[in-house]
Amino acid sequence: MNYNFLHLFISIVCFVQSISVLASGSPENDSLYYTTPTYAEVIKAYKTLDSTYSKARLIPYGKTDSGLPLQLFIIDKQGLFEPRRLHEIGNTILFINNGIHPGEPDGINASILWARELLENINTNTLLDKVTICIVPVFNIDGAMNRNCCSRVNQDGPPEYGFRGNSQNLDLNRDFIKCDTRNTQSLISILRQWDPDVFLDTHVSDGADYQYTMTLISSQSDKLYPVMGKYMKETFSPLLFKRMKQKGEEMCPYVDTKNYDDIPEKGIRAFLEIPRFASGYCGLFNIFGFIAETHMLKPFSKRVASTQKLLRSMLEVVSSESENIREARSLAKKEDVVRLSFPTNWELDTTYSEKLDFKGYTAVSKTSKVTGLEQYYYDHAQPYEKKIPYFPKYIAADTIHAPMYYLIPQAWLKVSTLIDQNKFRLITIKEDSVTTAEVYYIESFSTTDGPYEGHYLHSNTRVRKQVEQIKVSTGDYLVPVFQENNRYLIETLEPECADSYFNWGFFDGILQQKEWFSGYVFEPLAEQILLSDSLLKKNFESKKASEPEFAKDSFSQLYYIYKHSPYYEKSVNRYPVYRIGKR
Ligand SMILES: [Zn+2]
């Protein structure tokens, strides 16, 4: 009964929301400004464009968890749909990814409108002379098919949309390293094949209230290769902001408040997209990544129109800057293969801030009728324009010195398969041997209390390194580090990096001790061990003397001796990917 009442109430709210959007006086009257199409309707729209224009093509790629293939829509003025050839002739590839979060469908709609507009005038549009457009109509197809009215509770329309999680209830925008979904596996295959120069992921924001409809995340410049970071910060990103302003659509850097759930006036910071995110993943492959975040409280029609303006601006800038974009990428790729050390684990520099012109709303406080406690809200009767602190800079907390090779024993098939799927060169070992390698031992790490995106994610991992002779078997894999895009190898294979395969739990088997002892049998042996190892005996006695709990615990004492004896297994916490050779 209660549920029915709630459902009726929500339906009325959604209906009123859609009416208010229609009444907002938007000049556009296409239904794409008011409702978002179903997945079947989206594909139908692109199929119509494919059959109408020879310069457009919709190509199905690998499967997604929905069972349907991931589709890629391409617009090329020369009608060339072959990525290698397009790179050879010097075209720049602009890649738009939509519906990673299908509840945020602005880009799904805007891309259809934009594609139509581009194709109608393609023969006279000089912006497309050297730029090829790739559009993923919907990435999370399964989520898009799971439509509902209400899961984006704070968002102003459309009346119905898809759900954030895919059929495995995973957020695809955390899946780019662990690759649990077929959606991500297929998109990675497309990205590695097309190697876009510029990648844009379309979203709708949560969080604070302010006057802008569009906010933009430009890949955090410190973590890009210096040549790309400098170009992004000084040229590419400012040009986009300028083009949007010229279109009467002033935008703001994504409003990520410095402290969680705080107000923007206290300071906002540049967003750090680590490799698990789509744009963070692209950064490892020297792709200029962007995330569009329209503001959830603006009507859907306004958000779609704003996303369309960003797509137009993006094409204008990519077209005029085509040479510079390709040049910066090419230099970064060349640096990959000679770079000896890799900065990683980026942390916000809280000591450095700039002043950012910001158009916000004053936050005021009132007593909540629900909780009886103070609740702040943004008062639209009190808009403001002022400078607020902006924290744009990140510093690498760690530096990894690269080995010549990583050796991946064939038992760790999931790891070697992912490296292969990301198009890295792997050498299969042809004969058994023994070699010298640096071996990591996991010294410490933290783990989430509950599952995070299907894994018990580790963090704050620390390792100890020692040189050992290791056995190399026929069929193991050697991964040369000095190859293009090798930041991916460092960020995934070095356990201390935030999004390493270790932190995603791929190597959890090594964290468990397999064999134990029985105290009554081990006790006489423990006595012998202490007699033959004077240093161990000294350490054991001093531990007993300084730790009363230890002194009273017979199992802990025997375990201490066992752990420091030759009987303790060598494989516990021994990381099984080895570092071989130094440049
Ligand atoms: Zn999103």
Image (cartoon, helix red, strand yellow):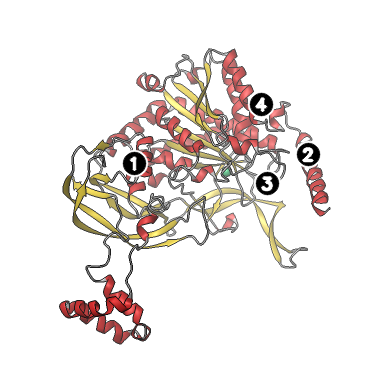
Q: Which mark is residue 20?
A: 2
Q: Residues within 10 Å of mark 1 (few under 14, many from 20)?
A: many
**Coordinates of residue 449 in the picture (x, y in percent):** 51, 62
User: Viewed as shown, does residue 22 lie left or right of 520?
Assistant: right
At a point 58% along the width and 56% down the height, the residue shown is 265
First reached walking from the N terminus: tag 4 or tag 2? 2
**Coordinates of residue 580 in the picture (x, y in percent):** 21, 47
Q: Amino acid at mark 4?
A: Glu
- Which mark is in front, 1 or 3? 1
Residue 204 sits above or below residue 58 on the image: below
Q: Is mark 4 within 8 Å of ligand 1?
A: no
First reached walking from the N terminus: tag 2 or tag 1? 2
Marks 4 & 2, CB-CB < 8 Å contact: no
Mark pair 1, 4: CA separation: 39 Å
At a point 55% along the width and 28% down the height, the residue shown is 312
First reached walking from the N terminus: tag 3 or tag 4? 4
**Coordinates of residue 512 in the picture (x, y in percent):** 37, 61
Quadrant the C terminus occupies: top left
Residue 217 sits above or below residue 98 on the image: below
Mark pair 4, 2: CA separation: 24 Å
Q: Amino acid at mark 2?
A: Ser
Task: Say which residue label 4 marks.
Answer: 41
Mark pair 3, 2: CA separation: 19 Å
